[in-house]
Image (tube, helix red, strand yellow):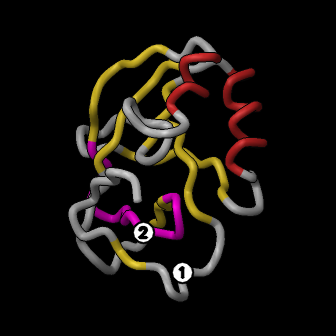
Amino acid sequence: MKFFCYGSLKRGQTAHHFLESHNAVFVREAVTTPDYHLYDISWFPGVVLDESMEGGVHGEVYEVSSDCLDQMDRYEGAPHLFRRETITLEDGEEVIAYLFNQGLDGCQRVESGVWNGS
C-alpha cells in the first residue's frame, strides 16, 4: 500500500526510524491536492481537509505493509487523535494518510505546507 507522510515520519525527522524498522520503501516526494492543509498542533503536525481554502501539503510517499499500517495506527493514536484515510495527491494518485481528528483551537496553520519539525 502507498502511504503519504508529512511530519515526523519523513526522512530526517524524529520518527523516521519507525518506517525504517518496518521496511517501508521510499517511493517519491509528493504534494496533496490544494484542499488539504497542514497545522502545527504542538510538537507534531496534523493535516485536515478543508475545501474552502487553497493549500497543499508537501510530504513523502512510501510503500508499506498492512502490518506497518496497523503499527502506525497505534503510534498515531488512530482513530482518536488521527484517522487513516485515502487522500488524493496533486497528480491524481490516491494514497493512505493520517488526518488530524481533533479540534484546531490554538493551532497555527503552516502556510508553506512543509513541516520541518518544531
Residue appearing at x 66%, y 57% in the figure: 82
Where, quadrant-wise, is the C terminus in this rendering?
A: bottom left
Q: Position of residue 46 (x, y in %)?
A: 50, 61
Q: Position of residue 71 (x, y in %)?
A: 75, 31
Position above or below: 110 against 113: below
Is residue 46 a member of the stretch shown in magenta?
A: no
Q: Which residue is mark 2?
A: 39
**Side of 107 where 65 appears, left or right:** right
Residue appearing at x 45%, y 66% in the figure: 49
Q: Which residue is at the front of the view, 45 or 80?
A: 45
What amino acid type is highlighted by mark number 1?
Leu
Q: Are marks 2 and 1 in contact (CB under 8 Å)?
A: yes
Q: Residues within 10 Å of mark 1 (few under 14, many from 20)?
A: some
> What's drawn in magenta, residue-wise?
31-44
What amino acid type is highlighted by mark number 2?
Tyr
Q: Which residue is at the front of the view, 52 or 103?
A: 103
Secondary element under disc 2, as helix, strand or loop, is strand
Residue appearing at x 38%, y 63% in the figure: 38
Residue appearing at x 28%, y 37% in the figure: 30
Q: CA distance from mark 2 to mark 1?
A: 8 Å
Is residue 35 a member of the stretch shown in magenta?
A: yes
Q: Which mark is residue 104?
A: 1
Q: Earlier in the sequence, mark 2 or mark 1?
A: 2
